[in-house]
Image: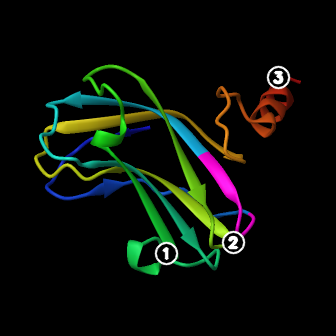
Amino acid sequence: LEIVKTADGTTQKASTSFQVKNNNTYIISFDVKITGTMPTTNISLFAIRGFKDKNTSNSAANATKNVYVGKNDVSNLKLDYWHRVSIKFDTNADYLRIIPYNSDTTNTLNTQYRRIQVEEGNIATDWTESSSDVDKAVLLVD
């Protein structure tokens, strides 16, 4: 997934809501690569939002909790290099949305994402393909 800046302002690509266990801990991990010009401020690169209802519209104001991953949260952030990032999220809701997010307002920064993974617990594991994706691939081959 790539977020290419085309206008001033925040750009995001929110997932659909998916059910989680309330009052539980999850680890959300992903790879991110930035291209363009390194921002001088701590822009947001990713967001996680909790919602009480599956159909609540995606906005920070509607969320029970918002967690943002900023440029300063990624150690040794460099341009044109994939960085693996993990963030802990303690739920206070029944649904989550994960949101690749680019809050750069200069139109000079593009963000790329891959290998987004949500895991129950507080330890990030190596990325693995979802078993449902593997099952679909097998069905397509048969």
Query: Residue 84: which disc?
Result: none
Instruction: Single out the mark in the foreground, 3 or 2.
Output: 2
Q: Is residue 16 above or below residue 1?
A: below
Determine if the magenta segment contains residue 25: yes
Between 119 and 80, which is closer to the camera in this rendering? Answer: 119
Q: Check the image and report above or below for 94 versus 86.
A: below
| Mark 3 vs mark 2, CA separation in Å | 36 Å
Q: Which residue is labeled 2 in the image?
A: 94
Amino acid carrying label 1: it is Ala
Left or right of 97, for residue 10:
left
Tell which circle, 3 or 2, labels the residue nearer the N-terminal end: 2
Q: Residues within 10 Å of mark 3 (few under 14, many from 20)?
A: few
Q: Residue 120 in the image: x percent, y percent? A: 73, 49
* Quadrant into which the N terminus falls: top left
Let me know if residue 61 is in the magenta part: no
Q: How many marks?
A: 3
Mark pair 1, 3: CA separation: 41 Å
Residue 134 position (above or below residue 102) = above
Q: Which residues are magenta?
A: 21-27
The label nearer to you, 1 versus 3, is 1
Three-letter amino acid code of the residue under disc 3: Val
Q: Residue drawn 24% across and 49% down?
A: 43
Residue 4 in percent (x, y) is at 27, 41
Residue that badge 3 annotates: 141
The 10 Å Cα crowd at callout 1, few under 14, some 14 to 19, many 20 or more, is many
Label 1 residue SS: loop
The one nearer the camera, 104 or 73, is 73
User: Dots 3 and 2: beta carbons under 8 Å?
Assistant: no
Mark toward the start of the polypeptide (1 vs 3): 1
* Residue that badge 1 annotates: 63
Percent x, y of residue 142: 89, 24
